[in-house]
Structures are given as C-alpha cells and as structure tokens.
Image (spheres, rainbow, N blue to C red):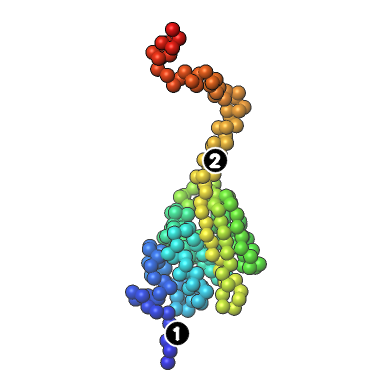
Amino acid sequence: MSDDRPPSVGGTTAWLAGGGEMGERIRAFDWASTSLGPTTSWPQSLRSAISILLPSKAQICMFWGPEMVKLYNDAYISVLGRKHGSVLGLPGRQVWPEIWDVLGPLLKGVVDTGEAFRANDHPFYLVRHGFEEETYFDVSYDPVRDETGAVGGVFCIVTETTWQRSSRSRSTTRACSTRSSGHAPRPKRPAERRTSFWPSSHTSSARR
C-alpha cells in the first residue's frame, strides 16, 4: 500500500521544514485548536503556499479560510511590532482590529472576485507599538485557490514604505518652504566659481 504522506524532514513534513523562527512557531503551534485543524489535514494548496512563504526574505503573510486565519514569515515580524508572538493562528479581525474596516473588505474582494489587489503607498493606521501610527505599504494581495477551485486564502506580499514616504514628504516640504520664502541660495556667477578654486595668494599675484 502506498504512503501518500509528504516526506519527513527532521521529524516534520518537508513542506514545513526551515523558515527560521516562524517555521519553529508554526510547527509547534496547536493548529487543532483553530478552524484550520491539525497540519496533517491541511489541503495541498495551503501546504504549498506555506512552503513558499516560510523561506522567503520578502515580508509575507497569509489569511486562510472563512475566518481569515493569520500566518506569516520571519520577514513580516517587524510589520507586527508588539503583536508578534500572540497573533499567529488568530482570525485576521483579531490581529488587526484597528484597520479591519479597511483590510477586511480588501481581502474579501480578492476572495469574492478571484482577482488580485495591488497598491503603492497604501495608508494603514496601525497600533503595533502601543499607539496609533500612520503607516504606508506597497501591497500585493493574491488569491490562492484550494482543491475545489474556490479561493481558499489570500497571499499577501508587502513592503513597508513609511520611512521613504516620510523622507519624500520632508524633502517636498523643505523645497516648498524655500520657494515661498524667497530665500533660495543664490547661485555663484561664473567669475566667483573660477576664483573660488584658487588660493588667495595666487589670486593676488595674478592681479599684479
């Protein structure tokens, strides 16, 4: 009789091997207590998505099933801030209650239509360090179809752009301030540029 189980690697299944801290957390987590059930019952579509998510260096999370249960990789830890360590396996609504009125419909749109959602510098007001932050992300939310052909989950690749956007905003503000004040630096005249490269003694001798 053939054995349909995936090959074992280090006491676990191959598709769950590696993945750093989050690989260890996912392997040790009591998934039977969630709506996903034990990992042995997970569909191949979910297993394949996890095997891509775990080793990736991109910031990736995934929402799976009707409750949009949260899974994520090491690179995504910084996105969560203090939430990390307590949100694995929770429904998305409980992970991000402060933005679920925005994020929930975006994810539902992907599930309902089967079409990906993509945006640059998308604003999210996150509470991840004990206070609300105005943050920005480049996001790509892609549908993952299960064995029935329906969308079983959403694969989310994100890149936080908060600092880059803030830097661009400060640069724009300074430029606008300079123009409005009328005190832009006066460019040197050609003669000033030429003489400024010569020592004063050389300049004096050249004038004799």
Query: Which residue is under mark 2?
Result: 168
Q: Please tell me which residue lies in front, 141 or 27.
A: 141
| Residue at the spot 53% in from the left edge and 42% down from the top edge | 166
Query: Which residue is under mark 1?
Result: 4
- Does label 2 or label 1 sit earlier along the sequence? 1
Can you say which quadrant of the picture contains the C terminus? top left
Question: With respect to residue 157, does 195 lie above or below?
Answer: above
Question: With respect to residue 182, does 100 lie above or below?
Answer: below
Q: Amino acid at mark 1?
A: Asp
Question: With respect to residue 44, does 88 lie above or below?
Answer: above
Q: Amino acid at mark 2?
A: Arg
Quadrant assignment, res 144: bottom right
Mark 2 near mark 1, Cβ–Cβ under 8 Å?
no
User: Dot 2: what SS?
Assistant: helix
| Residue at the spot 50% in from the left edge and 69% down from the top edge | 49
Residue 39 image position (x, y, % from top left):
45, 75
Residue 168 image position (x, y, % from top left):
54, 40
Quadrant assignment, res 29: bottom left
User: Dot 1: what SS?
Assistant: loop
Residue 175 image position (x, y, % from top left):
57, 32
- Mark 2 is surrounded, within 10 Å at the Cα level, by few (under 14), some (14 to 19) or many (20 or more) other residues, namely few
- CA distance for labels 2 and 1: 54 Å
Can you say which quadrant of the picture contains the N terminus? bottom left
| Residue at the spot 50% in from the left edge and 45% down from the top edge | 163
Q: Please tell me which residue lies in front, 154 or 186.
A: 186
Q: Is residue 125 visible?
A: no
Q: Is residue 27 left or right of residue 63?
A: left
| Residue at the spot 45% in from the left edge and 62% down from the top edge | 56
